[in-house]
Amino acid sequence: MSSLLFNMGFSVNWSWFAALSCLLSMGGEVWCDCTDTGMQMEGGSYTLTKQLQKGSMLVYQCPSGYYPYPTLVRLCQLDNTWRPAPKRFSPQRCKRVECPDPNVLEYGNVSPPQEKYYVDNETTYECYSGYTMRGSSTRVCLPNGKWSGSTPICSRDSGDHCADPGIPAGASRTGNIFGIDDRVRYTCNGNLFLVGSSERVCQENGQWTGKEPACYYKHTYDTPLEVSEAFGSSIKDTLTTLESTDDTQEGRKIRIPKNGTLNIYIAVDISESIEKEHFINARDAVTKLITKISSFSVTPNYEILFFSADIIGVVNILDFLDGKAILSNVKNTLEKFEVGDNNTAGTDLNAVFEHFLERMAIIKQRAGPEGFKEHRHVLIVFTDGAYNMGGSPEPTVKKIKNMVYMNHTTERETQSREEFLDIYVFAIGAEIYDDDLQPLTAGIGKHYFRMKDIENLQETFDEIIDEEEVKGLCGLHKEYDTYDKDSKRKMYPWWAYIIVQNERPKRCLGSLVSPKFILTAAHCFTFGDLPEHVTVEINDEQGRVKKVKDFKLHPNYNVNAKAELGVKEFYDYDVALIQLEKDVRISSSVRPICIPCTQETSDALQLVGESTCKQQEQLLLKNHLEKLNFLTKIGDSVDEKEVHAKLGDNRDDCIRHALQAPGITTDNPKVPVTDNFMCTGGLTPFRDHIACTGDSGGAVFKNYQHRTIQVGMVSWGTKNLCKAGGMVESVESSRDFHMNLFRVVPFLKSVLGNDTQDDYAPLQFLEN
């Protein structure tokens, strides 16, 4: 009998009896669990946050292009029932993702006409005669419930001050006059809700205030790529709201200033309504964000907390202001934080913003009203928006705005201060309370993102951060593969390919060390080579192939210097600098690597005060077995090899293998391998990669504090195991020898640090 009940679902009487039994046992602290009867979903699956215990959230999952229907989540209540309760006549299933109705286009046609539009459906837009199309003429319904491209608009030159702002799919608009101070208002149709500005005003500059609205279903979400694009990929001036190509968007980024004070306040929701996976992803995203920012020559102040019913402070911004906080400790604390025994039963979102407001008040008191004007504030909150205590945070957010905006009342005064406050709300979790979160992000510089998956937020944060002011800093790079055509360039933006076309054509690698100079190996050149024989390939915005003005070899380089001592080809001082005819265009894909003994490298290593060359070397080459990397060319791209430099006590055993190299007859390995070389290769204690033909001249580098520092250069080896490049591993006796750049600094300084010429900007080398 009982098995029949479970298969067919509870009867009303059985459900009432179970609930009554549960209530009768509550006095003895015995709670009833929910059951998984009737929870199954056609075409999908579910997970439970606390098995079937009270307070557990059941979260449904569907394949891409589908969403759970009729509900996204269910909550196990004290009386062993689920809220919302499953319905016998509306079973849980995966439903095809639907996009908002595009048939809102004024003065044009949408085809094909359909009652509903699902994933992969394509629509075409055509304007009536006399009207001009702006936006996308074709759009595709995407798996996240949005249309590809931009809103199509049919308009004509009517003499209005502002362009027709259009009507997003699924929306209705009131207002058809677009003169100065005229307003348009938007609402969403059916069961859609509005994200963005419900009201926009035509300004004197011909632009609309606010952000173009969009109509979302509950299953609609923003992808990391869309979050990135919302800030604009080519914004040059981040201090003002900029117009974009479609006249309807705006872009903002977190500005990384060379000077000034940047305060970043971060809060992560750890309440019961947030799944553990979402918490871990949010915590890791925060760690990646502060790691990314720390790679710049700026030191923002951080306030980082986790919250539910209580505020759990992880990092106090006042410790930063007092000089007590160490960033490495901050990251360690973040990485180790677990929800653990913290009270996660309730959620007080207002307490988060009250906490931030209190911190700002203390900063203002310390800095004084004038000093506080120079402080920029960035608030980043990860939450689902559910709160059951503390009330709405909206009034507190208004107080924060008033404090930063200096209580200015006129619209123009407020706009002059809006650049000093950015609020980013990342809506995470299975069920998001949009109506409570969106008011927090109203206005310029306030952004609301509805995230399904925040695992890829590192890419998003890279785009949020505006590197325009600091893009020329050495050693900046992407730390992950973006899987686009420029991915390897962004990971190794300094690598260059050198071709010498003379009697004996040669190909080498090199590294961009300043906008006008490439560092490579001297042996890439032979007697009789001239600048016109040399080309450098480094693909910037101006093209791929660069012409060469001149090249200089180290004055002590002499391949025949020790022929009489049993070394047929001697490669000491194997370095050269190539001067390009024109500066390369610096960008995220093309920028210089850091080299030893420059002030920029000290900044990258975060050495304070008057640093020395020795300090840099001790920091970068401090171990007797130092893990380093260099590149090998594969097709039109590169790949990264890993080696271990044997230093100190390990060096002698490594360099003895040089005696096995062709053309060496001396029995003293220190004759061909001077102190200017680093030795890598072999099988122990790690199997290194080996250098191939064509790897010569490439940077031997180390990533430190998320900046790339070149410490050496590929020169020569004992065995030719690979003639065409590639990822080849060492054998037991194969060894490579790399020029140690710390030993050739005088040559680098004589060229790159030359301040007696006007042809290029010199690098600043350290005095000691």
Image (tube, grey):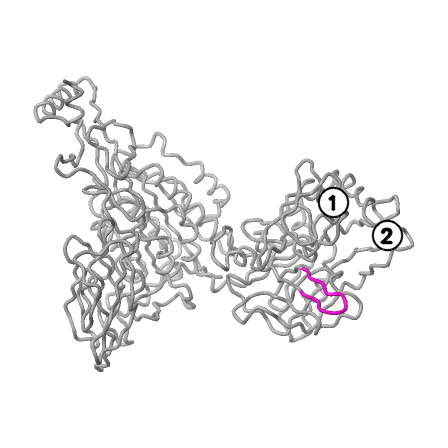
Snapshot quadrant of residue 644: top right
**Relative vertical location of residue 328 with respect to residue 567 in this rendering, above or below:** above
Disc 2 packing (10 Å; few <14; some 14–19; many ≥20): many
User: Can the viewer see residue 389?
Assistant: no
Query: Left of 196 or right of it: where is 488?
Result: right
- Circle 2: element type: loop
Q: Mark 1 points at which residue?
A: 735
Specify whether residue 617 is in view. yes
Residue furthest toward the left? 13
User: In the drawing, what numbered circle is on residue 567?
Assistant: 2
Q: What stretch is highlighted in magenta?
A: 499-508
Q: Does the magenta stretch include residue 504?
A: yes
Mark closest to the chain's N terminus, 2 or 1:
2
Q: Look at label 1 and name its amino acid.
A: Arg
- Residue at 56% from the left image edge and 59% from the top image edge: 493
Numbered tag placed on residue 719 in the rendering: none
Q: Work out how far the residue at label 2 is from the one at label 1, CA to CA, in angstroms.
A: 16 Å
Q: Determine whether label 2 and label 1 are within 8 Å by CB.
A: no
Q: List x then y, in percent, for residue 549.
A: 68, 74
Quadrant (top left/top right/bottom left/bottom right) for the C terminus:
bottom right
Residue 330 painted magenta: no
| Element carrying mark 1 | strand
Q: In this view, does 72 lie above or below 289?
A: above
